[in-house]
Image (cartoon, rainbow, N blue to C red):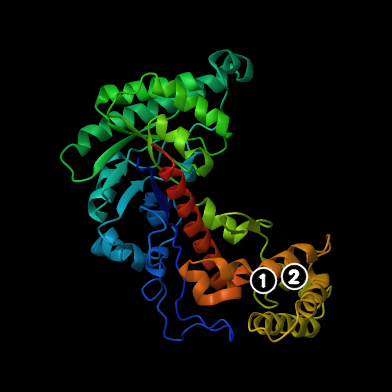
Amino acid sequence: MNKVKFYFPDSHDYVDPTFDFENETNNEHRVIQRDDKYAHEIFSRPVYDGILVSKAVVDGISGVKGKYSVAQRQRFFREGIYRFFRLPKSYSTIGDCGAFSYANEEVPPYSIHDVVEFYVNAGFTNGISLDHIIFDFAKSITESQKKFSPEQLTEFKRRKEITLDLAHEFYNESQSQSYEAYGVAHGWNPESYADSVSDLQSMGYKRIALGGMIPLKTQDILSILEKTAEIKKADTQFHLLGINRLNHIQEFSSLGVSSFDSTAPLMQGLKDDKFNYHTHADDYTSISVPQVEANNSMRKLVSSGTVDHDEAKRLEKACLKALISFAKGEVEQKSVLDTLCEYEKLYNTKKSRREAMEKALTDQPWKNCNCDICKDIGIHVILKRGAARNRRRGFHNLYIAYQKLQHQLSLMK
């Protein structure tokens, strides 16, 4: 079986293992991150092959703070990535620079020295070169000439050359380091991507990350891979930055892809408004029970006088009580749905989601899931309500995504 690795880009994604779902409380002695659990600590089997951490997330850029506190950043470098994340050595790690974070800058805000120092001090097993992203895409050289102005094409070429110049410097600086260096290929059509890959191979790179493709349709990604496959050396392997197209893993692999990274399964669990609880066969809409005093939309409705605080609080509590009782087999489904819909009238002016809620309560997909999250918290995994539940639902989606990946790989000869 060909192995295509999935890396999860971490951005401080962890949960409090002691959260009390019935009383809605955290452990008062909890120390954030230190006492919390990452996905690889929650599950009894892997849900990814490694993690990717961006310098921009840890350090921030151009005067903008990263997502790490000063103390966390210091501990990250003092302990190293494996100890900081409590990550077993069987997992791989990739460092990158977070090109999306500085995409609007004239040039990347870091030096190659900064990047190499970041990777070495943190103890990454793999490091991606400093790059400058190109967002636009055309299907061919001819279409590029029609679609883009001369000024746009000049800017695309400038960014491509910056990325290649930095890759050359990064390759030379990385030869004496312990991490494996990845060059980054950017382009605005399949041909320019292939040119970048060719140049990176000439520099000596055997690992090449293809970037800037997140907005592209799957067919466009395949067109890039097909073009780069024409000039790819036998020992060159591709990493897809930010791409999660599990149904096409077999095609990607046949064209030289050996790894990819994506936050999509987690973010769909956190932010998708419709199909945010995944299963192998179907996707479900989570059941909203917004927190009156913590949900921004509810707070605005209350502060504006549109919604009465006491009535909203009464219905919020009634919904939670009904759902927990339903999970224990103590109340009928119709009664739960009626209570949920009564509360829904306060915060949802659009079409009622009764049908979606009914489907979730009828199928109870969490009962058929073998993941540690569903077995541990049951019905709470499908409630859209605060980070404690929402992030766990995202973790559940990571589990499902990784299982789907393994299934696709098992079908490959």
Q: In the image shown, does 153 or 65 lie closer to the viewer?
A: 153
Identify whether 191 is placed above or below 45: above
Of helix, strand and loop, which one carries label 1? loop
Can you tell which quarter of the image residue 411 is in? top left
Horizontal side, residue 290 vs residue 141: left or right:
right
Identify whether 138 is placed above or below 181: above
Residue 342 x/y as whole percent: 82, 76
Q: Which residue is mark 2?
A: 300
Residue 389 x/y as whole percent: 57, 71
Quadrant the C terminus occupies: top left
Horizontal side, residue 39 vs residue 116: left or right:
right
Can you tell which quarter of the image residue 209 is in? top left
Q: Which residue is mark 1?
A: 295
Disc 2 packing (10 Å; few <14; some 14–19; many ≥20): some
Quadrant the N terminus occupies: top left
Q: In the image shown, does 244 or 163 lie closer to the viewer?
A: 244
Of helix, strand and loop, which one carries label 2? helix
Hey, what amino acid is under mark 1?
Asn
Residue 300 x/y as whole percent: 74, 70
Res. 177 visible in picture:
yes
Question: Of circles 1 and 2, which is in front?
Answer: 1
| Label pair 1/2, CB-CB below 8 angstroms | no
- Which residue sits at x=44%, y=62%? 12
Total marks in image: 2
Hey, what amino acid is under mark 2?
Lys
- Which residue sits at x=58%, y=12%? 142
Q: Earlier in the sequence, mark 1 or mark 2?
A: 1
Q: In the image shown, does 296 or 14 lie closer to the viewer?
A: 14
Res. 132 visible in picture:
no
Horizontal side, residue 5 vs residue 292: left or right:
left
Disc 1 packing (10 Å; few <14; some 14–19; many ≥20): few
Q: In the image shown, does 102 or 347 lie closer to the viewer?
A: 347
